[in-house]
Amino acid sequence: MTQPTWMYENFEPAGSAIGYRITRKLDEVQSPFQKIEIFESTDWGNVMLIDGAMMLTTRDNFLYHEMMSHPALFTHGDPRRVVIIGGGDCGTLREVLKHPGVESATQCDIDEQVTRMAEKWFPELCDSNNDARAELLFDDGIAYMANCPAGSVDIVIVDSTDPVGPAEGLFNKAFYASCFRALKDDGILVQQSESPLVLLELIKEMRGEMGKAGFTTFKTLPFPQPCYPTGWWSCTLARKSGGFDYRAVDARAKTFKTKYYTADVHQGAMASIPFVAEALGE
Amino acid sequence: MTQPTWMYENFEPAGSAIGYRITRKLDEVQSPFQKIEIFESTDWGNVMLIDGAMMLTTRDNFLYHEMMSHPALFTHGDPRRVVIIGGGDCGTLREVLKHPGVESATQCDIDEQVTRMAEKWFPELCDSNNDARAELLFDDGIAYMANCPAGSVDIVIVDSTDPVGPAEGLFNKAFYASCFRALKDDGILVQQSESPLVLLELIKEMRGEMGKAGFTTFKTLPFPQPCYPTGWWSCTLARKSGGFDYRAVDARAKTFKTKYYTADVHQGAMASIPFVAEALGE
């Protein structure tokens, strides 16, 4: 029995760190894109790191995956065609496919090794990988969106790592313009948007780039996420036009299970927070 | 210029850690009760540690202090007499005194040194210490509550450290029975109740002890708090009877400024979260 040790991620942009008590390293692979490591923890199940950054734990990933998918899907009137850029751990895909109205969901992650590691160490996230509606591609998400037929997609979910390294190209006007073109008029773009406590500048820049690509309305929803810096994270929704009222009746009547998301939680995440609104100029 | 270093708090009960990038130690005092240290950080302002546990930072303490006070004060119909047990940094006191209807607020912290350090290193939290309605006592909170005239208090806020060391006696039936007795029939007890993600057992036990003391209704409100383990924290409200509908109209019309709390945020914090509700047997 190895003695547990503490493993930390120092998040330089925020000057804060998070850590877990680890029992052993379970796996490691250097893909063409990044280094993926899996650790076993004492209290959080398995932990995936990519290039030293905490990506997910068995225990708390439901918060992120539910909030990256259900708010957008219950905001759209009738989401049938969903594209996930990144999301190689398959957790967002699983949540998206809980919606019976979804006819097809394509997950396009550049790094096949992320999915292989998820299948091995987070198999519960891959429960829906064999769903007939699921398509798993291992390819460049930027090219995928650029080649998407115009007006063919209801929702694009950008479930990526931080805007450095392989994911850098997913945070600029060129990429957002592809998303804009691929989305139908009532489509929604969703992107993980870092910590609303310390990275408001990033959210502002992201919205700025989205705006240059044609999106006109934005909504940032905060949620708890202990394995990410500050423990408080967000996703940002963008639309070509229109607001972010959601299908509360449908959300209340949903037939699938969630551990965090409910209609009331969705409503709560819509609440304007004074210091956030001020920083974003809302 | 000292090179910044990383300082971590390993939170053993949750197997998770938090940390900050620190430039230097500013102050330290060993009081009769505990060791208080103040550090300067690169991004979070000053950081107070008590016996090695992060207590507050300049940057994020508003989340905790606002959520420990305003939900309770806007739930009570007409809060005039408030008692704060612990709370030596004076941040909760400042928030309570923002309510013009409050006639007196007593803060009773066993450790005067916490307040002296707050005055020195977090002076903004002490803005209301000279308010004519404020009373600052440095005494045993357990004894204070036991000696409070029966039915004399509208709200008791237990703003303490974790249930180990000096604060241990603030989490059991005997203390809650004193609070019950001191509170008027429509009174509210509020207590910080740790992380709703990992310490649900503690919340359950706390509610159990409150129940033995006579309280019949409970509501746990989660909120983000990066400087505490998991970054997600909570307060638990308890009443002798009755629910937790709040004065939404008054909260919307409040004349004082907050950075996080609003009526909508309050409403959002009331949302039942499936995995929390299940663990608490709600």
Image (cartoon, coloured by chain):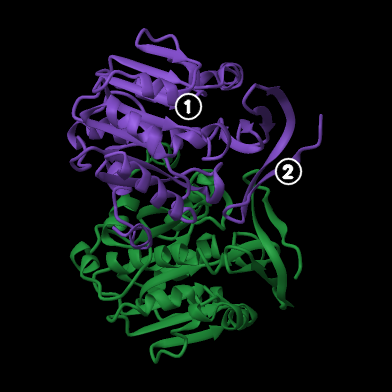
Chain colours: A green, B purple
Viewer-side residue, A64 vs A32? A64
Q: Residues within 10 Å of mark 1 (few under 14, many from 20)?
A: many
Residue corresponding to mark 2: B6
On-image quarter of the N terminus of chain A: bottom right
* Sequence-earlier tag: 1 or 2: 2
Q: For the C terminus of chain A, give its image quadrant.
A: top left
Q: Of discs 1 and 2, which sits in the foreground?
A: 1
Mark 2, secondary structure of its residue: strand
> Could you tell me if residue B221 is visible in this image?
no
Left or right side of B5 for B75? left
Q: CA distance from mark 1 to mark 2?
A: 29 Å
Q: At which x and y percent is residue B133?
A: 34, 11
Question: What's under tag 1, amino acid-wise?
Answer: Gly
- Chain letter behind tag 1: B
- Vertical arrangement, residue A186 with respect to residue B43, above or below: below
Question: SS for tag 1?
Answer: strand
Report the front residue among A235 and B62: B62
Q: Which residue is mark 1?
A: B86
Residue B212 location, quadrant: top left
> What residue is rendered at 33% in x and 72% in y?
A257
Residue visible at 28% across and 28% down in the picture: B181
Residue A179 screen position, x and y as percent:
44, 69
Q: Which mark is residue A41?
A: none
Q: Residue at x 42, y 71 (%)?
A: A156
Q: Amino acid at mark 2?
A: Trp
The residue marked by circle 2 belongs to what chain?
B
